[in-house]
Amino acid sequence: MRVLMAIDASEASRKAIDYVLQHRAMFRDVQLTCVYIDPPSALRAVGAFGADPGMPAVTPGDPQAMIEPALASLRASGMQFDLAIREGEPGPEIAQIANDGPFDLVVMGAGKSGLLRRRLLGSVSKTVLRQSKVPVLIVR
């Protein structure tokens, strides 16, 4: 089975990773690909100006450094994975990667997003559910 797991530095992402680690027997023979979608500059600017509490106040300099704690917990558990980092709107990008790639399942966390982000994009998990042709497991 080929699994695409959307990750970032959020608590929702942490819960998805914890779920996979707690249910390792179910994910034992998977080919895991982790994907981080770096939001476009317009969305990062919204967070930087404090206009939306759901967006980070600081733009991370290095996306891989930002998600390293999540990756470290996967590595520490012995899970093997590939990593993809892309830029774009997270929901549509995750769905596109799932649809284009040879994936059987998408795993992602669902968390709180700020009002402005929901108004502009809708929730990431809802967007992935609507646009993905691949089954989606949402961890809360």
Image (cartoon, rainbow, N blue to C red):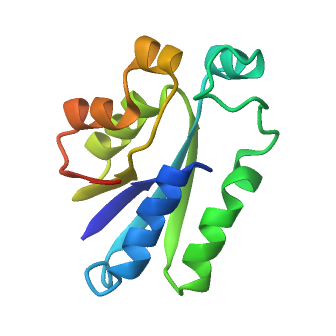
Residue 92 lies in what quarter of the image? top left
Residue 87 x, y percent position in the rendering:
58, 32
Q: Which residue is depicted at the point 68% across and 65% down? A: 69
Residue 70 lies in what quarter of the image? bottom right
Residue 71 vertical position relative to residue 85 in the rendered view, above or below: below
Residue 84 x, y percent position in the rendering:
54, 51
Residue 136 vertical position relative to residue 129 in the rendered view, above or below: below
Nearest the camera: 106 or 82? Answer: 106
> Does residue 54 show up?
yes
Q: Quadrant of the N terminus?
A: bottom left
Relative horizontal placement of residue 75, taking residue 81 as reference (left or right)? right
> Does residue 103 show up?
no
Q: Residue furthest right?
A: 61
Q: Which residue is depicted at the point 38% across and 70% down? A: 19
Q: Which residue is depicted at the point 42% across and 61% down? A: 16
Residue 54 x, y percent position in the rendering:
58, 29
Nearest the camera: 119 or 8? Answer: 119
Relative horizontal placement of residue 8, taking residue 66 as reference (left or right)? left
Relative horizontal placement of residue 32, taking residue 138 as reference (left or right)? right
